[in-house]
Every structure is written in C-alpha cells, then in structure tokens.
Image (tube, rainbow, N blue to C red):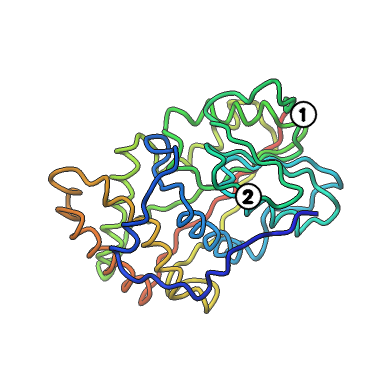
Amino acid sequence: MATATLLDTSQRTVDSPADLYANTVFSGTEGVYLLPHNDTEIERLQRQHRFLKTATYGQLIPSLLQKDAAVLDSGCADGTWLADLGCQHPQGLKLHGVDLTGELFQSTPGLDLRAHDIRTPFPRSWGWSNGFDLVHQRLLIWGITSSEWPSVIHNLLEVVKPGGYIQLVEAEWILPNVPDHLPEQKLLNMVQTWSTESFGADIHVWGRLGKLLQAENCKAITEESFDLGYGATARSQEDKNRSAELWAESFRHLARNIPEGGIPGVAKDAKAYHEFLDRLVIEMKAFGYTPRLKWLRAQKAM
C-alpha cells in the first residue's frame, strides 16, 4: 500500500508578493506549462490537493476500485494524488503517474512515476497500451492548449483498458454575472481570460470535454459538479482564510509574463498586478469566490 508523503504546510502564511515572485522558477517546463514547476509549487499543489479533497467530501474518485486495479495519474506533479488514493484503497492498487519532468517526484514505495509529455503517445516499450482500469487527470487547463486537447484525450484513452474509465477534472473558473460589489472578481475573470488566451489555452474547456470524449466513442459519460469555495465560501472553517491566500499565490507568477502595457483593464505593470491580488484576497475573505469543480468520467468502448 502507498503511504502519502505530504508536507505539513498548515501553518504557512503568505508573507509578501516579493517572496512569492522570487520563487517563480521553472524546472524544464517553461513555455510548455504556464505554472511554475519547483519545490514551492509542489508545496502549493499539496495544499491545493487537501483543499480540493475537502470540496469533494474526501472523494478522489466516484467509486471504489477493484483489487489490483491499475491507475494512471496524468500530470501527477510529485505523486500526491496517487499516494493519497493508495491510502484510501488499501487492497493493493497499481499506481502509476506521469509528468513533464521527474525532478520533483516523491519516492513513496508503490508509486511508479515517469517523465512523459502527454501531448505525445506513450512509448510502446512501456507496455501500457490498453493497460489501465482508470486514467485520471486534474486541472491541466494551464498546461494544454485548446488545440491539443483532442490529441491528449486520444493518447490517454490509448492506455485505458476496453471497458475501463477516464476521469478528467477541470473547473468552471469564470463566473457569469459577477455582482458590482465584487469588483476584484470581475478583474479576476479578465486575468484568467488573458492568461489562458495568451498561452493558447481555453478557460472554458470543461464545457468541451464531453464532446471530445464522445468523439472518441466513449460511453457512459457523466459529469459531477462540486462547489469549490474560496475565502468566505470555503467548505472548511480552517480554509476560509488560507484558501484565499492559496488562490492569490497560484497567480503571483503571472507577473513575470505581463507584457509592456500591462494586462488590459487590470494592471499596468507587475506592481499594480500584485496590488490587485492583495485586494482580491481581502474580497475573497469577505465575500468568497465559488467556481465549480467538474468531474467528467467516461467508459472506453469494449
């Protein structure tokens, strides 16, 4: 059974924008993945994992897996989701994960973590074709461009067993009809649209995934939604402050990508951008921000 190795970051606080900006270093992923790939980012992702797990009432997958089921986590980061899944299913799962680089993989026994770009087919030498009962992928909207999604889904389905399942987890980040008393969330919509469009990604990709799965002849396509409350709307009392800080921390790194002239309608430069994020944290703590987490699950045809 895999044992989860999670950093204890419950007491960590966001000290200053400068501290966070100093840590936005990439590890072999710049130009491929919009977010940083370093120890600081892994620590943030581990906190995010616990937060997402709370939002889904502790579930990582909709139902129990059979004994000895083979699971692949696409975009596994350091392997935290897989390690936690192993703890929830002590019957001996075969746990595999892939990410762009392997520098930050944890060494938990029972995890097979490999470096691979999911925009390309998996190596035949790995023997993974039609090999997994479940392939899982979570929140890769900032790592996959809009035009790459069809080939990514095809590559993932190539390693799903006939009759097995694929689970794609994304979110409805852009909230429609934001009220006037939440001006920073209106700006947040603009920042998320700007950041994804400048990368070639699609902030609304969650709405396309069902059709992409249909195009691959998948069956039994289902969608389940969860409120993903940040700040005042966080499900857990202990998350009400730190989730708002976690959100802003996720976006500090974009200051390095601000072009000359700034982000239209939001910030003229990096300093103004960090000031916007500071105001956003205050607003989230007071009123909350509640995007919808989307679980799309489909069965590969027999």
Disc count in the image?
2
Q: Is 130 or 80 nearer to us in this picture?
A: 80
Q: Quadrant of the N terminus?
A: bottom right
Q: Is 211 or 48 nearer to us in this picture?
A: 48
Which secondary structure lies at badge 2?
loop
Q: Position of residue 139 (x, y in %)?
A: 51, 47
| Residue 60 image-quadrant placement | bottom right
Q: Position of residue 115 (x, y in %)?
A: 58, 35
Q: Nearer the viewer, mark 2 or mark 1?
A: 2
Q: CA distance from mark 2 to mark 1?
A: 25 Å
Q: Which mark is residue 79?
A: 2
| Residue type at the position of mark 2 | Gly
Q: Position of residue 151 (x, y in %)?
A: 53, 25
Tell me if residue 91 comes above or below residue 101 in the rendering.
Answer: below
Tell me if residue 215 comes above or below residue 36 in the rendering.
Answer: above
In the rendered image, which residue does mark 1 sit on? 162
Q: Is residue 70 left or right of residue 290?
A: right
Which residue does the image show at 25% across and 61% down from the upper left? Answer: 274
Contact between labelled residues 1 and 2, with CB atoms less than 8 Å apart: no
